[in-house]
Image (cartoon, rainbow, N blue to C red):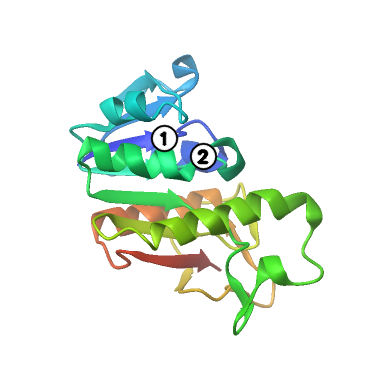
């Protein structure tokens, strides 16, 4: 596939880039600093601005899918969605957040009294992005929420998938950037959560 990856040099984005390339897809890495993109086969780095809707749409044209891996507080979801639609790309995968997941039936993590205030702006922006995606009728979107702890680790390929409820085990709630990338590209190659949010964890 021809995949456009917005935010290819971030913590999650860099692992997603590695995973996409590993599976033989062609990637356009859209970033603020193209020189920071690793020199890999089948990867073309392009300078892009997530707030430039028209410019971003031009970069996205001709791709089979778009993956968005950008901070919610450093982007405008309405402009991102509009750019994907203007480019004529039907498949849109978003690196989501954990804050909108349910800790208990009907209770989102972000609504819990002990939710860390430092993470609230990003979590609220992520929840708003998900709400906006759910209003889209002509876009095959998927929003993949990580677990509570989302950090560097190993690529094991062994994890659990869920829907809107936080995945947790005896060791807590976590997923590595590397295994998150595996789950996301699995979804890219074999869509199972079109117009849905799902989550991944150990």
Q: Disc 2 on helix, strand or loop?
A: loop
Q: Please say if 163 is above or below 95.
A: below
Please rate how many residues cluster around mark 2, counting C-alpha atoms within 10 Å: few if below 14, some from 14 to 19, many from 20: many
Q: Nearer the viewer, residue 99 or 82?
A: 82
Residue 61 horizontal/vertical position (percent) = 22, 31
Q: Which residue is at 29% across, 64% downward? A: 194
Q: Which residue is at 38% across, 30% downward? A: 53
Q: Quadrant of residue 21?
A: top left
Q: Which residue is at 36% across, 58% downward? A: 142
Left or right, 97 with reference to 87: right
Q: Which residue is at 39% across, 27% downward? A: 30
Left or right, 98 with reference to 196: right
Residue 122 horizontal/vertical position (percent) = 65, 49
Q: Earlier in the sequence, mark 1 or mark 2?
A: 1
Residue 57 horizontal/vertical position (percent) = 30, 31
Q: Circle 1 is placed at which residue position?
A: 6
Q: Please say if 143 is above or below 7.
A: below
Residue 100: mark: none
Q: Nearer the viewer, residue 58 or 29?
A: 58
Q: Circle 2 is placed at which residue position?
A: 70
What is the residue that sits farthest to the bottom in this orientation?
A: 105
Left or right, 149 with reference to 35: right
């Amino acid at each position: 596939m021809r995949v456009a990856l917005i935010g290819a040099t971030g913590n999650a984005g860099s692992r997603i880039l590695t995973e996409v390339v590993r599976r033989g897809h062609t990637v356009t890495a859209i970033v603020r600093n193209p020189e920071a993109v690793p020199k890999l086969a089948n990867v073309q780095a392009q300078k892009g601005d997530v707030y430039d809707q028209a410019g971003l749409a031009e970069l996205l044209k001709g791709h089979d899918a778009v993956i968005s891996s950008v901070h919610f507080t450093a982007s405008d979801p309405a402009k991102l969605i509009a750019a994907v639609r203007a480019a004529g790309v039907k498949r849109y995968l978003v690196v989501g957040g954990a804050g909108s997941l349910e800790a208990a039936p009907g209770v989102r993590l972000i609504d819990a009294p002990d939710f860390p205030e430092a993470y609230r702006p990003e979590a609220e922006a992520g929840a708003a992005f998900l709400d906006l995606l759910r209003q889209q009728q002509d876009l095959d979107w998927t929003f993949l929420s990580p677990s509570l702890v989302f950090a560097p680790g190993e690529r094991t390929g062994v994890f659990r998938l869920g829907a809107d409820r936080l995945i947790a085990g005896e060791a807590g709630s976590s997923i590595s950037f590397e295994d998150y990338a595996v789950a996301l590209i699995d979804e890219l190659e074999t869509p199972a959560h079109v117009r849905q949010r799902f989550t991944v964890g150990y």
